[in-house]
Amino acid sequence: MKDWCPYMMMMVLQLGLGTGDIVSKGALEGGMSYHVFVVYRHAVTTLILSPLAFFLERKTRPPLTRPIFFKLCLLALCGYTVAQNAYFAGLFYSSPTVTSAMNNLCPAITFILAIIFRMEKVNTKTHRGQAKVLGTLICLGGAMTFIFYKGYLFPPLKDSSIDIHGLNSHSGATHAKSDWVKGSSFVILAMLCWSVFLILLTSLCKDYPAPLSMNAWIFCFVVIQSAAVAVIFERTASPWALDWDLKLLAYVYNGVLVSAIGYSLQTWCISKKGPVFVALFFPLQLIIAAILSALILRERLHLGSVIGACLIILGFYCVTWGKSKDHKDQELDERNQTRDEEKDLNKNVGVSP
């Protein structure tokens, strides 16, 4: 059971992420403001993480210096305030299938940014270097296919959706503001911001080795920043009203299950199996979102969407395979270096003064 636990956890996590987008889309169709949604979602997450961080890391938490404070603010702005507002704007204009497909662009975008910032070297003479470059190109080509071929060059597939009453009174396919090109562009912007966030987070983890406290601070700053954004775009009190409806479910579901519990499960799986293992399950969210969107939101799948999604997943696995080879080589180099240091230490101990 211990061996299967990470696999079950990742499948449950992807099911939760896919369902979270469905619930959020239903709430958006019901009139929820995505600017207010980002505020309430991360307010719930902050209320959960802050007490845990305070008690569990009170002895190991380093002091919050001014440079770390500004880094946390920058991470909050880039990784959540801008990224989440763009992501849910993309969900508002498109569908959970689109957002789930574009999520798989993250490794390719991160790889491109790592090359630009000289954090990644590409050796096209090796198989892993060729896989990363080829996978990035396939991902980008799949994204373009997904965006521009949907509804234009390819006919829609057979509509297999069923009507489930009570969740949403409007179909995502017939919503007046539906615009797949605009929605996909917003999600790509969100993935770009998230990739920058991942690159910046690498350096901060070394300076502030207290993950719970770091996330609690980041989410606290996100609430403040997102509230400022929401006040600018939502100048009436009605979007902020709370009631026992689908909007409240979206706030609580995403704040508790997706952000607080979901990210914790993902961190636990990374500690047990590594980041590559976790990344391999990301395309499962696309499959879950596509099925649920067809059943609940009555979304009609198009052949262009299917081809684009398959290309994105293929490119995703190519990049992931190349990165996994890099991690294995890095681990081997670290083991060899440690072994050499131990040999040198034994030689020095054995030499008499």
Image: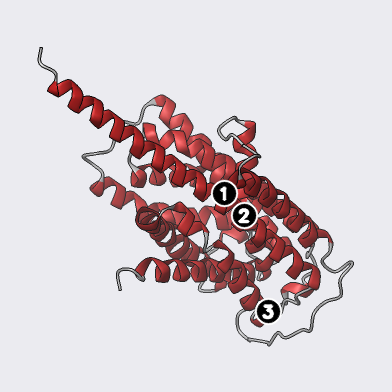
Residue occupying image coordinates x 34% and y 49%: 50
Q: Residues within 10 Å of mark 1 (few under 14, many from 20)?
A: some
Q: Say which label, 3 or 2, has the lower sequence index.
A: 3
Q: Evaluate if marks 2 and 1 touch, with contact meaning CB atoms under 8 Å apart.
A: yes
Q: Residues within 10 Å of mark 3 (few under 14, many from 20)?
A: many
In this view of the protein, which residue sits in the foreground, 308 or 179? 308
Give SS at disc 3: helix
The C terminus sits in image quarter: top left
Amino acid at dot 3: Ala
Q: Is residue 228 visible?
A: no
In this view of the protein, which residue sits in the foreground, 74 or 339? 339
In this rendering, would 213 be left or right of 253? left
In this view of the protein, which residue sits in the foreground, 313 or 133? 133
Q: Is residue 2 visible?
A: yes
In this rendering, would 101 be left or right of 251? right
Amino acid at dot 1: Gly
Residue lying farthest to the top in this orientation: 353
Q: Position of residue 48 (x, y in %)?
A: 36, 56
Question: How far apart are labels 3 and 1 at the CA level?
Answer: 34 Å
Q: Can you identify the residue that label 1 sits on? A: 322
Residue occupying image coordinates x 68% and y 70%: 29
- The nearer-to-camera label among 3 and 2 is 2
Q: Which mark is residue 294?
A: 3
